[in-house]
Image: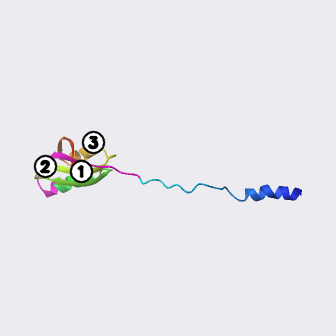
Amino acid sequence: MRVFLLIIPFFLACQGPKTSSPKETAAPETITTISYTLSVEGMTCTGCENTVKNAVQSVEGVAEVEASFEDELVSISVSESADTAAIRQQIISSGYTPTGGFEIKYK
């Protein structure tokens, strides 16, 4: 009888933890995208557009960039975590001058 009483706790310990709840799945994270336009002076050709576009795309959180030297505008789609000051600094570092502020572009 003593052997039987010693085997029961050993047997129960070998069963492992029991989980009664089903696996929970995390909801997918929603990322909000915001579109801005920014006036930029100094762009005179399509090469300038590409320079500004490449500079802005290097900033983390930037999803899409379009530049127009004719309109002196840059259209930027970013995640809400993107740093607009870093975008402005990248444009300045590329040799162009952002004027005004970021204007939300409504669709």
Q: Which residue is mark 1?
A: 76
> Which class describes the residues within 10 Å of circle 3: few (<14), some (14-19), or many (20+)?
few
Point out residue 29 in the picture as x, y percentages from the top left corner. 41, 52
Point out residue 65 in the picture as x, y percentages from the top left corner. 23, 54
Q: Is residue 34 left or right of residue 43?
A: right
Q: Which residue is mark 3?
A: 85
Q: Which residue is mark 2?
A: 72
Q: From the image, which quarter does the N terminus lie in?
A: bottom right
Q: Residue at x 17, y 44 (%)?
A: 97
Residue type at mark 3?
Ala
Q: Are marks 1 and 3 in contact (CB under 8 Å)?
A: no
Q: Is residue 96 left or right of residue 29?
A: left
Q: Which mark is residue 66?
A: none
The alpha-carbon separation of the residues under discs 2 and 3 comes to: 19 Å
Which range is magenta? 29-48
* Residue 34, magenta (yes or no): yes
